[in-house]
Every structure is written in C-alpha cells, then in structure tokens.
Image (cartoon, helix red, strand yellow):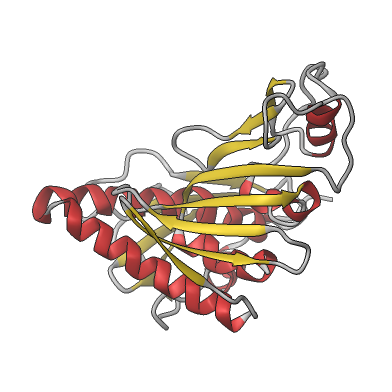
Amino acid sequence: MSTLISHAETAAPLAALLPARRGVPWTVEPAPQLIRAGGAMSRLVQGNRALDVVELGGRVEVYADRDSMAPVAPDVVVTETGPDPVAELSALVLRIVLPRMDREAARATRSAHGRDQVVIDTTADLNEIGFSLIDHGAHLDVVAHPDGVGLTWTLDNGAEWGLWAITSTGNLTVSYEGPVSGLYGVLPVLLPAAGPAGSDDVGSGFTRHLTDRFPQVRAVDAHSVEFGHHDDVNGYIALPASDEPATGADSSRRVAAHFANVGADLLLSLAPLLI
C-alpha cells in the first residue's frame, strides 16, 4: 500500500535519520526561498550545510544548498510508492547528496587553500568515524599511507576492514578482506535500490552467488563484480587471486572488496554494521 508523504511527516523524521557531525544534529527551519510553486518547503540545517526539502503531494524533492546558486534540479526525488518513503529518502541523502556536497566543498577548498587542506579536512572526518567505531567495539590500528592515513580493524572471523583518507576528493575509501558473508549487512546500504531484474549472469558460480543476492552488482568477469557509478558509491568485489577457481561459491568464500566515494555521514550511520 502506498504511503503519502505530507509536509508534517517528512522534514523532522528525515533530520532524525541523518547523523550528527561533531556533535551537531540536523535541525528543521523555514525555507528561505521558493523553489517549486505550490510545494510545501522546509530547510534542514547542520552547521554550514543545508538541504531544502520540497513536498508536492506524494513526491518529495531534496535540493542541496549551494550558497547563492539558484537550484535547477533536485539532487534526489522520492515518490509515494515505497513502504517507508522517509527511510528511502534518508538512504539517498546519505549515499548520494551528502557525499556530493563533500566533494563540492573539497573542490572549493582545494582551489582556495590547496590539496593539503582537503587532506587535513578528510582526516578529521576519518577521526570522527574512528571514534564512533571505537564506541561500537572496534580495536583500530592507524596505518600510514604515502598519500595519507588509514584505519584498519579485524573482526573475530578474521575479516579486515580498512578506512582510508588517501585522496583529495573529500570522500573516503573503504576496503574489506574476508568471507563474503561479512558484506551482506552493508551492501543493502551502500548499493542503490534494486531495479528490474537484468540479464542472467553467466560469469561463474562466484559472480552468480552475488548477482542473485544483489541484482545491483554487475559481473565483470568470472572472478569479480562491480557496482555503482562515478557520482555514487562505486567499487568491486573480487576473489583474492585471478587464478582462483570461480566455479563454486558460498557465504564463507573469501573476497576482497573496495568502495569509493563513501561519505563520512554514511560511514557514521554504518558503524554498527562494520563491527
């Protein structure tokens, strides 16, 4: 059954689903400008970041505030067809809108202050996520990298996660090595919603094990699948070696995975699933 999103039901619940940053939560304020005639509007504000929420009777649009630039098109749109539209909207904001805003801010910082300042800012995000992981029970190691710094932690099943601030994009990179079952909890959050079923995957038993469970991933060859696009979370899941047999697969099969364009807000919300 469809759920109609009304003005009173969207902005505050959406703000509650987005994580605080540096202890600052999102708050709801009146929108300062009219974006869509006939639409009910609210503004979500967190420090120097703001999102405008426009509600049009069963359709909700979110626009990232870009200083003095007039909004042209919404960053994400949700209609009333889902069972929980506000949760669907928050997932899109966390996976797409906020990381995009971070990348735009990083480009502006790099232009004004240089690449080193972007690395400093991204490392500060890494530290905030690290403390959240510690709060959830992770035992972290700080790992130096020629381009920056990273955090790694190992789970009881031998799986190892890594979180890396190694570029000047303003986003973070996540790595994983361990049984493929260790990804089952995070992939529904990191991947886009599943669309219509695509063509059958004839790559291998390994790739079919993943594409059957997560239709959003695409087989690259017998040993790996990929997912996402350049302006979204993207990456791959692969067998550790290209000469490893790919004929069979189960949840204990060890894999290596890589996730790029992951925003700090999304990682804060994911922390309990990474332990």
User: Where does residue 261 sit, x and y in percent of width and height?
Assistant: 45, 46
Count of numbered circles on the image: 0
Picture residue at 68% right of the left edge, 29% below the top:
224
Residue 150 or 243: which is nearer the viewer?
A: 243
Any part of residue 182 in sight:
yes
Expressed as whole percent of the image width and height from the top left, the position of residue 210 reads 79, 35
Residue 267 vs residue 41: left or right?
right
User: In the image, is residue 226 above or below residue 203?
Assistant: below
Figure quadrant of residue 148? bottom left
Report the side of 52 relative to 252 (left or right): left
Position of residue 251 relative to residue 214, above or below, is: below
**Closer to the camera, 84 or 275?**
275
Q: In this rendering, is residue 231 above or below 141?
A: above
Determine the image quadrant of residue 51.
Answer: bottom left
What residue is shown at x 60% (from left), y 47% (from top)? 78
Q: Quadrant of residue 42?
A: bottom left
Task: Answer yes or no: is residue 92 visible.
Answer: no
The residue at the point 43 percent across, 74 percent down is 128
| Residue 187 position within the rendered picture, expressed as x and y whole percent measured from the top left | 69, 49
Q: Quadrant of the C terminus?
A: bottom right
Foreground residue among 252 and 44:
252
Coordinates of residue 191 in the picture (x, y in percent): 64, 44
